[in-house]
Structure formats: C-alpha cells, structure tokens
Image (cartoon, helix red, strand yellow):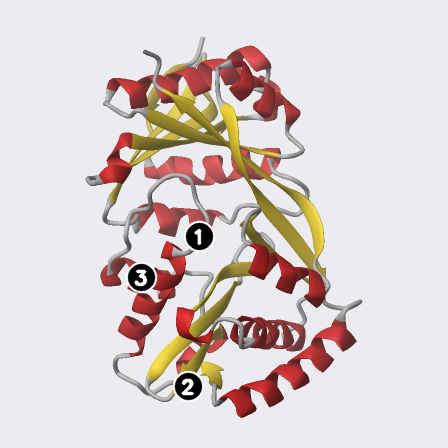
C-alpha cells in the first residue's frame, strides 16, 4: 500500500531521479530546470503534487495539473512514476488510481496521461484502467558530428534565401527593440494555437512567457529570432540544461504570414550551427505526430527517430 503526502521542496531532486530512471536512455531530467518550472508554473494552471511512500520511504510521485478556469478546466493531466525497485503493475496502478481519483473527484471530466513508446509496463497499466490512445509525440535526435556538412550547407542556402525573402535572422541578445518580448509572445501564441492537439489549451500570458527566457537552460544569445521589417515572425530555441540532460529544441514557431518561406528551417539551422561551435555532439527535438511541416524539416535536416510518447485519455465514468 502506498501512502501519499504533499511534495516538499526537498523532494524535487528525488523526482528528477525517478523521472530520469524510467525515461529512454540519454533523456535525463535536469533537477535545476525542473525546480524552476515548478516554481514558475503557468499562471492559468494549478498543480497538486504528492510524494508516494511505502513503509516511510519515498518510492514515487504523482502530479496533477489543471487549468484554473475556462474550457480546459474540465481536463486534468496526470504525471507520476515509481522508483524501479517498486515499479510493478500493482503499485503503478495504485499510483495512477490515486491521481485520477483526485481529478475526477475535483470535477474533471477527462484525465490525460502519458507513456513512452518503449514503456510497455506503463502503457499496459493505463490501458487496463480504461485509458485509450489519443495521439503520439515524435522524438528525434541529430548527430551533429555525422551531419555537420549537411547542416553547414543547408545553413548557407537558408541564409541566402532569407536575404532574398527580406527576412533578418539574429539572436534575441542582439535585438535592441524594446517591444521584442511582446512581439515574440504574440507570434508564439498564434503558432501555438495552430499546433495539432485534442484538448483545449490554456493561453499563456506575457508574464508567463517572460519566465521562459529566465529559465536556467535558456540564454538570450542562443535564442534565434526572425524579423520582417518591424515584426518578429519566427523563433527557435535550444535548451542547454545546466546539470544534465540532452540539448534539445525548447520551442520553434513562425507567424502565419511567413510559413512556407523557409523561416523555420533557417532558424533551426542557426541554432544547430551555434551548437556545433559550442562542441555539442547531439541535439534532440520533439513534435506532435500530426505536425507534418516540422516533421518534414526534421527528416531533411538529418534527424533520426528515437522512442516517442503515447498520449492517453480517460473519460470520467458515468
């Protein structure tokens, strides 16, 4: 039997270790980044976090996230897992039952949960509890050593195309526009609204978006943006975890007005060339499986598929 208590600040490192142990190889979770994300959660979202204990020892965690208001309030997202020594179908089922029970009791009509594609144990537990597969997220890895010439050649072509298109590409640190953050936020909200999804999203405030740029894995001299005249029309960012974990795409987005003009590719190229100059050997990215344009870019840039994630949904009984 598991017992649950509220998660305390001292538990964040433990949660990062649990998450790292169950994820695919090379997908470590940085505890510094995790702590920052939890301390700066989106203002339109509330999270309830618990530690699972057995015989007084920590063996897992459960996190339940819901929108504060609006249509998304009807849905809850469940995260959580167990240390490997305690990770069997019965105890994992008990952990999931605790989280979904809290969600349904609090009025949620749908609970969302995830399982990595390689994690048959977790997928089996969710399926047995009545969760159905909703969609899949694709993950990719790029070998910057093996694909260096391809990326450098593609970058040169993209730079020439951006000149012809009248698009200026630069880092956020080099942009003097005092309104640059608000412009990036508005463009990103437009792009996020167009991202394939099943459940409604919670809109991000400017204050929430500013917190993204202050995160310990984000640096403004490694944030690449695209401008057309006075408008910001694109962004691409690589996350550089300070403690552990892969360097990977944190966000790439373009305005509707420039899609199909190679802006996303040009921005991603600049992030990759910069990563190579910094000595990074591999980078990762992830996208919804229905996002055809970005999947095409990944393939042509030399990314190779690695295990992705399965999204599950469960309706409230009755």
SS at mark 2 in the image? helix
Name which quarter of the figure residue 310 lies in: top right
Going from N to C along the chain, the mark reached first, 3 or 2, is 2
Q: What residue is shown with label 2?
A: 174
Label 3 element class: helix
User: Would you call the spot at circle 2 few (<14 residues within 10 Å), some (14-19), or many (20 or more)?
Assistant: few
Question: Residue at 46% of width from left, 35% of height from top?
Answer: 15
Q: Which is more toward the observer, 235 or 176? A: 235
Q: Which mark is residue 65?
A: none
Mark 1 or mark 3, which has the lower sequence index? 1
Task: Determine whether, in the image, residue 183 is placed left or right of residue 219.
Answer: left
Q: Tag 1, which secondary structure?
A: helix
For marks 1 and 3, give the CA distance: 16 Å
- Distance from disc 1 to disc 2, alpha carbons, whole Å, reads 25 Å
**Image vertical order of residue 118 relative to residue 122, above or below:** below
Percent position of residue 191, x then y:
40, 62
Residue identified by numbered label 3? 209
In the rendered image, which residue does mark 1 sit on?
33
Q: Cα distance, mark 3 to mark 2?
A: 19 Å
């Amino acid at each position: 039997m598991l017992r649950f208590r509220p998660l305390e600040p001292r538990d964040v490192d433990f949660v990062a270790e649990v998450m790292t142990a169950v994820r695919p190889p090379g997908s470590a979770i940085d505890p510094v980044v995790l702590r920052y994300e939890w301390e700066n959660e989106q203002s339109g979202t509330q999270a309830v976090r618990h530690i699972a204990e057995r015989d007084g020892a920590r063996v897992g965690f459960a996190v339940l996230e819901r929108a504060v208001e609006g249509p998304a309030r009807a849905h809850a997202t469940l995260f959580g897992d167990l240390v490997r020594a305690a990770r069997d179908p019965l105890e994992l089922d008990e952990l999931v039952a605790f989280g979904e029970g809290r969600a349904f009791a609090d009025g949620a009509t749908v609970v969302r949960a995830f399982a990595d594609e390689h994690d048959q144990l977790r997928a089996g537990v969710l399926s047995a509890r009545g969760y159905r597969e909703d969609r899949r997220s694709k993950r990719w890895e790029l070998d910057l050593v093996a694909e260096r010439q391809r990326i450098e050649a593609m970058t040169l072509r993209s730079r020439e195309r951006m000149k012809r298109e009248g698009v200026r590409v630069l880092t956020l640190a080099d942009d003097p526009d005092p309104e640059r953050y608000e412009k990036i936020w508005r463009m990103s909200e437009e792009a996020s609204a167009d991202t394939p999804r099943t459940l409604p999203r919670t809109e991000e405030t400017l204050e929430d978006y500013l917190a993204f740029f202050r995160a310990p894995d984000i640096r403004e001299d490694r944030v690449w943006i695209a401008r057309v005249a006075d408008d910001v029309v694109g962004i691409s960012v690589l996350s550089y975890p300070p403690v552990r974990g892969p360097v990977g795409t944190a966000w790439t987005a373009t305005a509707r007005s420039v899609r199909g003009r190679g802006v996303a590719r040009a921005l991603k190229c600049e992030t990759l060339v910069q990563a190579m100059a910094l000595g990074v050997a591999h980078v990762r990215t992830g996208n919804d499986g229905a996002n055809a344009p970005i999947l095409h870019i990944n393939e042509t840039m030399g990314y190779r598929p690695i295990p992705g994630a399965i999204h599950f949904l469960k309706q409230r009984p009755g």
